[in-house]
């Protein structure tokens, strides 16, 4: 086997020598025909070299060589280390250039780390085998994981809330990379890897920069998709061989073991196709809309649309599953962060087989849309609730993306729906059926909307025990939570809907209450519109706290004006305290109310004696509010082909 | 041939194990899912897996408590119709020839009603906790060597002090004695120059009495010390058995008239042969599930003996124990599903 490898290396060297000879023949004295022939010969030699390299790779794979480093000739583009890394930038820029010029910044980012990459280039020409391959697979997997968490969890945001967690993620990755990418992976490789984290971390700024061009106004979703599909860390790792070659070379390289790890090829192939199709579909619309080009023959639009839809469906499923998994990580971190501020109370949403709330579905484009030809959308409004009868106003609007003040209202068959329990109703939103709802050629953001009143309830279960007894147990070193099978902290469960409602859980359970004197219990509620992208919290109608009637709210110790108590008609032995509704301008952020509940000795004794001594009691926060739910799509209105044909 | 495979009945190990009375909910009683407005029965399976049998003359009985969130459940039917007593009680026999596995009891505790779910929550999962609180006793008997030969003068003694005895399997009670460290403290000796009483032992060295001896012999006076290590081997809580307080009051997780020291203590008594030992401290407080006490023969009871002999150490721990069980119940909306 070693002889075969040696022979193959010699064959490659020979081919390179042939290539150099042919290249030397190229001089200005030759006529164009001869030059062309020589170039064809060089092209053929290049192909042979590539084939030989593939064979060499396979031989080394078979031989399970621990470290395979193909010595490439100094005149081949592969060996140019700086080019290799700059190529990453260039290649990224190349990808981006096809979609937006603003993405050149990525290319600059890649070039910026080119110097470190020069040294890396000595290594990047090779294929990784043996133990190093396992290490690299681990690093690539970790890089993909960090990238996906960053995207799904934080949306690459640089905000004070997410900065720390993103930093930690990339720091861990950098440390692992530093440990793994030591020689013989190549001098300077790890420095390159770590320095190249800067453009990744600054993706949000890139996003902002591109937005200045106005392009993202048209392609916000595509922008996100591409950012998702560009796990730059991973690309740096996998494509270190460089992409500073013509397209054929890139493609050939991708499909022929440019990825040193076999399975990454599949990953990038899928992402490449997904991004390409998305870009194609969006670009086709852009060109048609802006230049009013008319196509003759096969219209690629529907074909691309069909493929796009197929990919979108798979993508949606993937997103749902992945978001729920990765989403829980930052949510948990954010809860910890917010809780540590002391003014934000969090909770866990109730797990339902189907979520309660109001939803807009079936609101999507299909095929091409032309001006003067009626356009109809059929959004379906779905409701899942229990006690509530939900009355909602529904309508559709189109926002002209060139002129934001131009808003066109769709004609709808109904403007109000009344639903309860598990119900759904479709409406029709029509454009281009009368002068008031006409959409001229251009790009529009169409929004289906619903304004309704909704309630969110949050439930926190506390355990109360007599103070002296608890202290006695604790003083004896006993773990009272373990002995009495009691959770350490209360858990708040809030009902699924547009708002998050959390309650104070910064108390230890069991909460000890005194028979002799008054006991104070901190209680707090936070409401927050966590899904701001899906809708707006318009105003709060009712903001209440329900407590067992043994407890009294000290209105002097509340951060919001409070009235009550009144007897609860819904829960036996409960009373309701009502807080002053928060002002509208405060609803853009979260709203918290903190109070002190009190229970005096006699009531404490009554509360505990009514149970076996380990007294459970729930506190309930409720909020009733008006909410504006929105679902948007982007629409290209093309010039009417008949009118356009007539004009030509 | 067949009979050779028959090992015959295994001897009943009564004082073995680390469980006392266990409590579990009945299978599907209460059910894992209930509907709003429904009533359901709470059944507790009580099983005395230990060695102690309740003694009515001591006023022994156990109580069962149930805890639930009144937001979701109510016991109004109980209160109106008095189906069940407010504090259900029980008495159970421990393992014996009559009850080789201990006595079991299926106790109907309560009938609970399910309240309507307030608000928009779909199906709350709520916890129901039941506890059994009962008096119990741990008894250890150990044959030990009363080794009076402090000078190792006897070339052929009946027995020698083994020093430490360890126990891993428990004594058929939730509180176990895990180790007994035996020390024989010499207090002196006296030469008997005249015929007198000397220890009389059987063939195995057990003291069977005193006998007259015509030989001159040396009598040794020793004071046996026993360091007894105790562990709460169950997952419940040890509470103090106080003579003048009713079990139901002891079992209430409130201090009531009790003081801080009355909560986690157990009473210890020990005998060497027929002589009661002094234990210190007594009662002994259980700290982090473990404690230890020292029991010794009072000096005034230590008499001179001329040679080693075997005797029986008996240790009794007296306490109240509380074990728990829980079940998560899902409440379903009757107007929805």
Image (spheres, grey):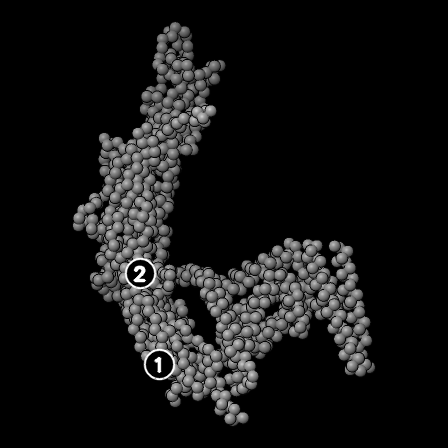
Residue A173, above or below A251: above
Q: Residue at x 66, y 59 (%)?
A: A128
Residue A625: image x %, image y %? 31, 70
Q: Chain of mark 1?
A: A
Give residue B50's quadrant in the image. Answer: top left
Q: Judge from the rendering whether residue A449 lies leftward or rightward of residue A190; answer left or right.
A: left
Residue A533 in sight in this render: yes
Q: Measure the C-alpha gap from mark 2 to mark 1.
A: 34 Å
Q: Which is more toward the observer, B21 or A293?
A: A293
- Residue that label 1 marks: A412
- Residue that label 2 marks: B337
Residue B307: image x %, image y %? 42, 15
Q: Residue at x 69, y 55 (%)?
A: A62
Q: Secondary structure at mark 1?
A: strand
Q: Judge from the rendering whether residue A575 lies leftward or rightward of residue A634; answer left or right.
A: left
Q: Secondary structure at mark 2?
A: loop
Q: Residue at x 39, y 27 (%)?
A: B9
Q: Residue at x 76, y 57 (%)?
A: A4
Q: Quadrant of the N terminus of chain A?
A: bottom right
Residue A78, above or below B111: below
Q: Residue furthest front?
A: B1
Q: Which is more toward the observer, A431 or A509?
A: A431
């Amino acid at each position: 086997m070693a002889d075969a490898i040696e022979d193959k290396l010699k064959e490659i060297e020979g081919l390179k020598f042939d290539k150099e000879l042919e290249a030397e023949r190229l001089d200005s004295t030759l006529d164009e025909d001869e030059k062309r022939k020589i170039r064809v010969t060089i092209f053929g030699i290049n192909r042979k070299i590539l084939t030989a390299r593939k064979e060499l790779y396979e031989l080394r794979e078979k031989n399970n060589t621990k470290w395979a480093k193909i010595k490439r000739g100094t005149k081949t583009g592969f060996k140019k280390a700086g080019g290799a890394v700059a190529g990453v930038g260039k290649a990224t820029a190349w990808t981006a250039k096809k979609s937006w010029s603003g993405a050149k910044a990525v290319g600059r980012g890649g070039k910026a780390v080119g110097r470190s990459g020069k040294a890396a280039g000595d290594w990047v020409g090779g294929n990784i085998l043996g133990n190093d391959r396992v290490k690299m697979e681990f690093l690539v997997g970790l890089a993909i994981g960090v990238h996906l968490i960053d995207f799904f969890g934080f949306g690459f945001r640089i905000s004070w809330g997410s900065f720390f967690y993103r930093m930690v993620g990339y720091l861990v990755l950098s440390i692992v990379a530093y440990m793994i990418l030591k020689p013989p992976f190549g001098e300077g490789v790890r420095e390159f890897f770590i320095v190249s984290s800067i453009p990744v971390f600054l993706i949000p700024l890139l996003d902002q920069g591109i937005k200045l061009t106005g392009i993202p106004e048209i392609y916000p979703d595509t922008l996100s998709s591409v950012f998702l599909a560009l796990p730059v860390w991973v690309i740096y790792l996998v494509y270190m061989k460089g992409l500073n070659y013509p397209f054929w070379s890139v493609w050939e390289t991708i499909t022929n073991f440019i990825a040193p790890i076999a399975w990454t090829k599949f990953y990038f192939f899928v992402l490449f196709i997904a991004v390409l199709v998305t870009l194609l579909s969006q670009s086709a619309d852009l060109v048609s809309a802006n230049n009013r080009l008319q196509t003759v023959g096969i219209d690629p639009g529907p074909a691309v649309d069909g493929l796009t839809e197929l990919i979108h469906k798979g993508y949606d499923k993937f997103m749902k599953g992945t978001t729920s998994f990765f989403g829980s990580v930052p949510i948990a971190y954010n809860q910890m962060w917010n809780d540590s501020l002391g003014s934000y109370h969090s909770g866990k949403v109730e797990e339902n087989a189907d979520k309660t709330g109001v939803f807009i579905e079936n609101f999507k484009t299909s095929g091409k849309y032309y001006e003067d030809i009626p356009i109809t959308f059929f959004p379906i409004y779905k409701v899942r609730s229990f006690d509530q009868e939900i009355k909602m106003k529904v309508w559709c609007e189109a926002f002209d993306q060139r002129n934001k003040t131009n808003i066109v209202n769709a004609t709808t068959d109904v403007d109000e729906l009344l639903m309860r329990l598990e119900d759904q109703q479709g409406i029709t939103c029509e454009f281009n059926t009368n002068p008031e709802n006409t959409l001229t050629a251009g790009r529009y953001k169409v929004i289906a909307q619903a304004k309704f009143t909704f309630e969110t309830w949050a439930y926190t279960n506390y355990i109360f025990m007599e103070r002296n007894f608890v202290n006695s147990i604790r003083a004896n070193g006993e773990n009272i939570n373990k002995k009495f099978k009691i959770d350490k902290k209360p858990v708040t469960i809030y009902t699924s809907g547009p708002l998050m409602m959390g309650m104070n859980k910064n108390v230890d359970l069991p909460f000890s209450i005194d028979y002799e004197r008054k006991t104070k219990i901190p209680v707090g509620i936070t409401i927050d519109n966590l899904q701001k992208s899906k809708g707006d919290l318009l105003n709060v109608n009712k903001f209440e706290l329900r407590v067992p009637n043994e407890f009294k709210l000290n209105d002097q110790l509340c951060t919001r004006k409070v009235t009550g108590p009144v007897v609860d008609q819904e829960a036996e032995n409960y009373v309701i305290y009502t807080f002053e509704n928060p002002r509208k301008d405060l609803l853009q952020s979260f709203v918290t109310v903190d109070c002190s509940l009190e229970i005096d000795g006699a009531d404490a004794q009554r509360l505990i004696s009514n149970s076996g001594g380990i007294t459970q009691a729930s506190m309930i926060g409720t909020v009733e509010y008006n909410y504006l739910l929105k679902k948007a799509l982007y629409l290209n209105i093309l010039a009417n082909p008949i009118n356009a044909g007539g004009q030509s | 041939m067949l009979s050779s495979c028959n090992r015959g009945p295994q001897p009943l190990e009564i004082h073995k194990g680390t469980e006392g009375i266990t409590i579990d909910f009945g299978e599907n009683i209460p059910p894992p899912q209930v509907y709003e407005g429904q009533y359901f029965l709470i059944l507790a399976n009580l099983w005395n897996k230990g060695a102690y049998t309740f003694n009515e003359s001591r006023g022994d009985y156990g109580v069962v408590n149930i805890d639930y969130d009144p937001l979701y459940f109510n016991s109004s039917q109980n209160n109106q119709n008095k189906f069940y007593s407010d504090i259900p009680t029980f008495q159970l026999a421990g393992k014996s020839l009559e009850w080789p596995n201990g006595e079991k009891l299926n106790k109907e505790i309560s009938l609970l009603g399910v309240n309507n779910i307030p608000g928009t929550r779909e199906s709350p999962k709520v916890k129901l906790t039941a506890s059994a609180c009962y008096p119990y006793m741990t008894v250890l008997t150990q044959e030990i060597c009363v080794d009076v030969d402090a000078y190792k003068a006897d070339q052929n003694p009946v027995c020698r002090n083994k020093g430490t005895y360890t126990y891993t399997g428990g004594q058929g009670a939730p509180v176990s004695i895990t180790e007994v460290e035996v020390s024989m403290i010499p207090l002196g000796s006296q030469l008997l120059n005249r015929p007198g009483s000397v220890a009389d032992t059987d063939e195995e060295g057990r003291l069977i009495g005193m006998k007259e001896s015509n030989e001159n012999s040396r009598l040794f006076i020793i004071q046996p010390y026993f360091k007894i290590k105790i562990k709460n081997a169950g997952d419940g809580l040890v509470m103090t058995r106080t003579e003048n307080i009713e079990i139901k009051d002891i079992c209430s997780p409130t201090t009531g008239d009790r003081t801080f020291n009355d909560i986690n203590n157990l009473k210890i008594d020990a005998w060497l042969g027929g002589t009661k030992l002094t234990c210190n401290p007594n009662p002994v407080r259980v700290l982090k599930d473990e404690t230890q006490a020292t029991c010794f023969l009072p000096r005034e009871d230590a008499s001179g003996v001329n040679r080693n002999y075997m005797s029986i150490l008996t240790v009794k721990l007296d306490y109240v124990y509380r074990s728990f069980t829980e079940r998560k119940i899902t409440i379903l909306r009757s107007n929805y599903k």
